[in-house]
Image (tube, helix red, strand yellow):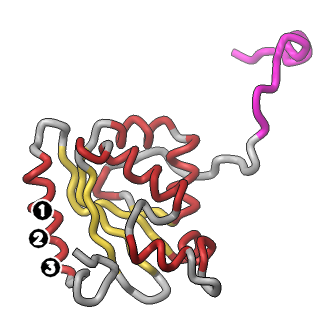
Amino acid sequence: MVRNASKLINELEVLEILPNMYTGEDFNGYENVNLSYDQLKIALERNKTYINAFKNQKAVYLITDKNTGNLYVGSATSNNGMLLSRWMDYIKSGHGKNKAFIDIIYNPIKGFDYIKKYFQYSILENYNPKVSDEYILKRESHWKRVLLSRNMGYNKN
């Protein structure tokens, strides 16, 4: 079925003109999440499949600095707003209250543009909302040990 736009054009209203056309793909599984800052921003602001997948999900995630190889292991729990809220914090602020990331943002040479250019976001483990926050935090600590992100990365705790 095809509609003739000339009969509808005067009834349509433009609500928003986006700065960029969405070119990303729909959410295709937690194990496949590996997004640049720009891809994550677009997915969280414009893609309902990502928004729905992340809004009630707990997770242990990895942020990789593709320039230096430094890693940051973080967690999304009910205490910090689940995965959608946690990653929206990174998109809005660039740092998500992480001291090492704050230092990058306020570095006059690097700044927020460094994070936008080099940071990549992926999920190590995902959990449903019924899993305890305590368990998620134990898994986060496990991954920090395994990936040495405290010694050679951005985790300071």
Quadrant of the rendered structure where residue 50 is? top left
Look at the numbered disc 3 and give the secondary structure of its residue: helix
Q: Mark 1 points at which residue?
A: 139
- Do the residues bearing badges 3 and 2 touch, measured as CB atoms within 8 Å? yes
Q: Left or right of 96: which side holds 76?
A: left
Residue 110 vertical placement versus 138 (above, below): below
Q: Tell me the residue at 55%/74% (across/down).
A: 105
Task: Please tell me the numbered disc located at residue 146.
Answer: 3
* Element under disc 2: helix
Does the magenta-highlighted stretch encompass residue 151?
no
Name the residue carrying label 2: 142
Residue 120 found in image quarter: bottom left
Tag 1 and tag 2, C-beta contact below 8 Å: yes
> Which residue appears at 78% of the width and 15% of the height?
3
Q: Which mark is residue 153?
A: none
**Quadrant holding the C terminus:** bottom left
User: Disc 1 marks which amino acid?
Assistant: Arg
Q: Where is residue 1 in the image (x, y as percent from the top left)?
A: 69, 15
